[in-house]
Image (spheres, helix red, strand yellow):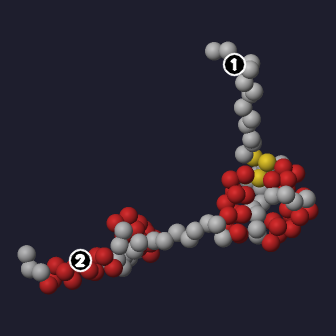
Amino acid sequence: MARNKDKPAPIIEPRCLTLQQAADYCALTPGGFAAWQKQGLVPGPIPGTKRWDRKALDAALDKASGLQQPVVVNEDDPWEVWRREKAAREAAKTRGGQAEPSAAAKRRSRTAAHCPG
């Protein structure tokens, strides 16, 4: 299919940025960007490269400016219960012992003891 020559080609913004591009993205000089990096405000380059991830920069700046909301965990959420129990089972395997029963498992056993079936 031929491209419509009346429409401009789409602008593709790269996700991986050079040091100069990352600094420009943050409206800093490369030296200022390095200072922010030392302060922990922005991440370093992608491991093994000399490129910065635009999304990582966005996430770090959101966190630094207070835009990133903390994750609230519902302790009774079935997913969280399963995740905690699985982590406890895996930890017990590495210790070679029994896992400590989860709070949900303790509640179930107390309920079963008080409610004969």
Q: Relative to 54, is 113 on the left or the right? A: left
The furthest residue to the left: 117
The answer to whether residue 112 is visible is yes
Q: What's the mark number on residue 3?
A: 1
Quadrant containing the N terminus is top right
- The single residue placed furthest to the front in the displayed view is 6
> Residue, x 72% and y 63% (percent of image)?
61
- Give coordinates of residue 2: x percent, y percent: 67, 15
- Vertically, is 24 above or below 104? above
- Residue 31 lies left or right of residue 41; in this view the side is right
Residue visible at 81% across and 65% down in the picture: 37
Residue linked to disc 2? 108
**Residue at 72% from the left image edge and 45% from the top image edge:** 15
- In the image, residue 66 lies at what x, y percent? 66, 70
Q: Quadrant of residue 26?
A: bottom right
- Upstream in the sequence, badge 2 or badge 1? 1
| Residue 13 picture location, percent across and down | 74, 41
Q: Residues within 10 Å of mark 2 (few under 14, many from 20)?
A: few
